[in-house]
Structure formats: structure tokens, C-alpha cells
Image (cartoon, coloured by chain):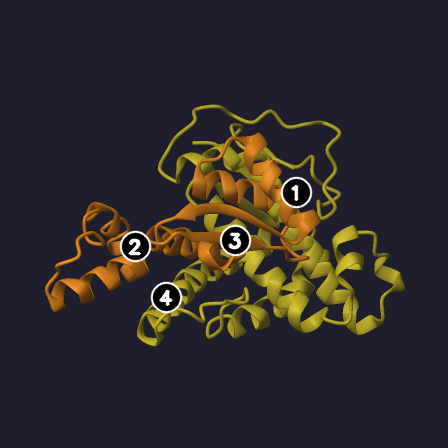
Chain colours: A yellow, B orange
Amino acid sequence: MKRIEVKLSLSVVAPLLDLMKASSDVLEAQIAAPLALDDIDAEFRDDWKAELLAGQQEELHALMGLFNSDFFVNGVVAFDEDNAEVIVRACSALRLRLRRHDLKVLGDEQLESGAIELESLPEPLQKPYMCYVFLGTIQELIIQHLDGAILRGAAAEEGVEFEPSADDDGEFEDDADGEDGGDGGDDEKR
Amino acid sequence: MIRALATPTTAAAEPGLAAGPALAPAEVERSKTALATQGPWRVVVLNDPVNSMSYVVLVFRKVFGFSEPVARKHMLEVHEQGRSIVWSGLREQAELYAFALQQWHLTAILESDETH
């Protein structure tokens, strides 16, 4: 099974987890993306929303579950064919929530450009924006390395190991990325 | 499981429902229902400033089975024009696709083809 492990800087990521958890808690009861289901009968619409919400809750539990006690020991999170899809979706849900709530003062073009200097933001926006970028980085990593698994479905197996790139520096990567915190030589670590 | 997911193509399996001038009242009512559910309907994805281009391409490939170039074309339409019609056809199937897109947190709406 194809699997990637990402070693994160605890000092950078740990402070973001409270905000992620708070946002995730809000999304226990509300759908992240706006819905326009006006021409659907009320009963069906309620079922529709309930089904979406149940799926969203499952995704968010999977994402937050990555940051367990093991994470606080070694700073590593792992993605594979079993969790890639739900984690990518959960990141999207949280980013939508952050954008609509914590980062609502930022313009769409400003946010889409990705050219925001963290230090230029007012202090209350810095953590939400860090969180927003972090989740986007996680998404891109998964899409880059596990898109095939997502397209085939979670149960498929590829049987190909990822060859790590020596010059690939992730924004949230720990300085000590040469250490082997994984459980075997087959796993990728960025 | 929502209705659309349970019976995605039942309307399409009944092509004769709308025909015939001498239908009994129950059949007329059934015909109206069939027409309403058969469409044509469009699934439209609206732009949002949050989901990345690569994410949207992935979702289109996953949900519709689009090739990468087709998925990218629709993604660029969403990005540049604010919306893209990604599918059209029977109502129940359109609901199924809209639901799938919303599971991926894209903003997807249904539009009647007759309104355009």
C-alpha cells in the first residue's frame, strides 16, 4: 500500500490544533460549503443535509485523529489509500470554515493569489491564515502523491513505493527531517 | 441513504410515461411526476475562493470520471467564468451528482435546462 509520512514541526503545528479543533466542533452541526437546494422538497432536503453532515463529521474525526498522542511524540502524520480521500475532504471543510469565519475580512482575490505575507496580517488573523495554509499544504501533498489511490477508491492497492525527493522542502517540515521516525524503510517522509 | 442515491435512474427506465392522449387520471399524475424528475437538468459548479485548482480537478475526475484535460477545462471555466455546467440529464441523476460534489465541499447547484 502506498503511504506517505510527513514530519511536521511540532512548534509550528501544535499551536494550530486548538483552532482546528474549534472549527471542527462547529462543523459537527453545520455544513461547510453553502447549499442551494431551494427546489427540493423539505423532507428530502433534510435527509440530504443530514447525509452530508454525517460524512463531514466522519472526515473531520479522521483528520483530527491524526494529531493523537503519537503525533506529539514524533511529529509524524501518515497518509495512505485508506485515509487520503477523507483527509483531503476534511481539509477542504475546515478551510471553508476558516475562510467564512476567521478570514472573512480578506478578499477573495487576495486569498486565491496565495501571496499574503503572514507578518503583514493583523495578529488575530495570523493563526487562522497559518492554519488555512497548513491544511492546503496537506491537501496538495495528498493530491500530489495519492491522487491515483483516490481516483481508484480506497481499497485499491498500487504496489509502488514513492521515491522521496531530496530537495523537496515542505513549509511545515521539521528541521530534523533526516531522522527516521517511521516504522520501516518503505515509507516516504517529507 | 438519500433518495437520489437509492434510485438514481428509475425515471430513465420509464420512457413511455409522458406519451399518449388517453391516459387515466392516475396515469396523468404519474406522467407529470415523471416529467418533473426526468429533466432535463443541469449540474452547475460555482466558483469558490478556497478550493484549489488541483483539488477541483481531482473532484471532477473522481465524481464524473473525466479525463484530466476535460476536468481541467471545467475547472478553468469555474475559475474564470464563475461557473461550469459539468453534467446535464435526468433529474435524479443530476441530484446524485450534485450530492457527490457537495460531499467534496464544492458549491454545486441544479438548474432546469428550460430556464436557459
Q: CA distance from mark 1 to mark 4?
A: 28 Å
Q: Amino acid at mark 3?
A: Val
Residue at 67% x, 63% y: name it.
A16
Residue type highlighted by circle 1: Leu
| Picture residue at 13% right of the left edge, 68% below the top | B25
Q: What amino acid is found at the position of numbered circle 2 in the picture?
A: Leu
**Tag 4, which secondary structure?**
helix
Residue at numbered disc 3: B44
Which numbered tag is attached to residue B5?
A: 2
Determine which of the numbered discs, if any, sits on residue A48 in the image.
Answer: 4
> Is A73 rendered above or below residue A97?
above
Residue A172 point in image, percent of width and height: 71, 48
Q: CA distance from mark 1 to mark 3?
A: 13 Å
Discs 1 and 4 lie in a common subunit: no
Q: Residue B88: horizontal and vertical position, in percent?
A: 43, 47
Q: Which mark is residue B76?
A: 1
Query: Is A76 located above or below residue A169 in the figure?
Result: below
SS at circle 1? helix
Dot 1 and dot 4 residues touching (CB under 8 Å)? no
Name of the residue lying farthest toward the left? B24
Tag 3–tag 4 contact (CB < 8 Å): no
- Of pointers 1 and 3, the one earlier in the residue sequence: 3
In depth, the one of A185 and A54 nearer the eye is A54
Same subunit, labels 1 and 3: the answer reads yes
